[in-house]
Image: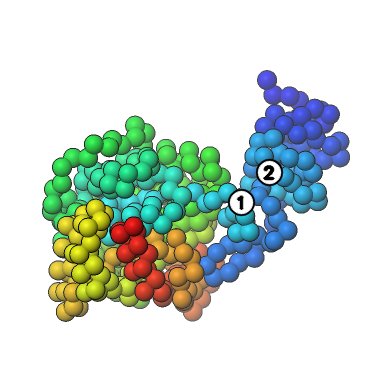
Amino acid sequence: MRRNPTDYSRKRGRCRQTCAGSVPCAVRSTPTVVIAYKRTPQVWLLPTDRRQQCGFCRQTRRRQCGFCRQTRRDGVVFTRRLLTVNPQGGEAVKWIIDTDPGIDDAAAIIASVRSGLDVTGISVVYGNASLEHTLKNALRLIELLDVRIPVYPGVDRPLLGQLHRAAVAHGEDGFGDNFLPAPNRREEGGHAIDFLLESARRFAGNLSLLVIGPLTNVALAIARDRCFCDSVSQIVIMGGTSGARGNATMVSEFNIYADPEAAAIVLGSGIPITMVPLETARKVLLGVEFLEMLERSKAPLAQFFSSICGPVVRRVERQRGARGLVLCDLVAAALAIEPGLARSAVQSYVAVETGGSVSRGLTAVDYSGISGCKPNATVCLDVDAARVGDIFAQALTT
């Protein structure tokens, strides 16, 4: 039974602290709390005199909070809406990978898990292949990695418009038309959107998303509960173009083109977004030496990836006249693992074209500020390509 919040002599239910008579009770009336943030190009930081927040108390605390077991400093107000944990210490950021496992998605998932990113779950969406295949591919990867990460099936079609797939780049099954045996691992019983919403409530202010497929799952989570936007600290997206050089159409990148309306919802949500466009991802070419390493390696992950990456190798050779791998989603994952990999980035307003016969799915980046709109994304323009390759090579072979 909830105690009377006006009785300041009693302990409050969620926080289990005794409220001083002069302090307004957050159960009765939650005040608007503002904390000054300091921002660098790659990471959101709290001032060094801040500790982790009490998500339920939201009041100044001298003693230990009974809910989150963190010591509070006197004279400091804590709020639930933090963009990230204090880099000086505190709980690790939780990540959800929202993906449509094709070949480059596999590289991103392997790198994320093996590099120690705290992945709390994988939500699967249609895209590179049908949802049936992308779900099986995600389960195969988790089984191969031998980790206990739940996999949730998501949406199998875009919000509006025609369903598009990337069979030319990834094969009908998403893994180079190898049509591998069915995995022994099974998906979770719930839906990906419910998982996203529950995780946002559970890890409020400490949850980040790595989105490397069409953005339909995330857009529907935002539409279902607007509090989702307040609870997610950041989204790292592989998608869009920075200069209208597309791969799905002349000007559109596939993940955005697959569901432009969903992309527009996410970019308009107010969640801090880091966008890795196609032009940036294409700068990272894992060349002949990397392919030879894959062929020589006896590591199971390296052998598996070597068996599925054929379509990408042939596509790169046809387009560039050189052997190698361009794994777009891997670049976004590497940036999530090590934000310092970004060599150049710009904060800008990014709009998504949802109409037009030629320009549908185009991401228009307002470099000059001519729109007058507030920036809604950090667009990564260049990365440390050698370090991206090192991260993936280490993930495959160790």
Residue 102, picture quadrant: bottom left
Residue 354, x across and y down, in percent:
34, 60
Find out whether the residues at labels 1 and 2 contact each other: C-beta distance under 8 Å: no
Q: Quadrant of the C terminus?
A: bottom left
Residue corresponding to mark 1: 90
CA distance for labels 1 and 2: 9 Å
Residue 192, x across and y down, in percent:
37, 41
For the residue pair 350 and 82, the one nearer the viewer reads as: 82
Residue 360 lies, with reference to residue 283, above or below; the image says: above
Residue 79 lies, with reference to residue 330, above or below; the image says: above
Callout 2 amino acid: Gln
Residue corresponding to mark 2: 70
User: What secondary structure is marked by label 1?
Assistant: loop
Residue at 37% in and 40% down: 148
Q: Is 99 placed left or right of 81 in the picture?
A: left
Residue at 21% in and 54% down: 304
Q: Is 65 placed left or right of 398 in the picture?
A: right
Residue 287, picture quadrant: bottom left
Q: In the rendered structure, which disc, 1 or 2, sits on the residue that comes first in sequence?
A: 2
**Classed neighbour count for the residue bearing mark 1: other residues with Cα under 10 Å, few (<14), some (14–19), many (≥20):** few
Residue 302, x across and y down, in percent:
24, 58
User: What secondary structure is marked by label 2?
Assistant: loop
How many marks on residues? 2
**Classed neighbour count for the residue bearing mark 2: other residues with Cα under 10 Å, few (<14), some (14–19), many (≥20):** some
Callout 1 amino acid: Gly
Residue at 77% in and 45% down: 60
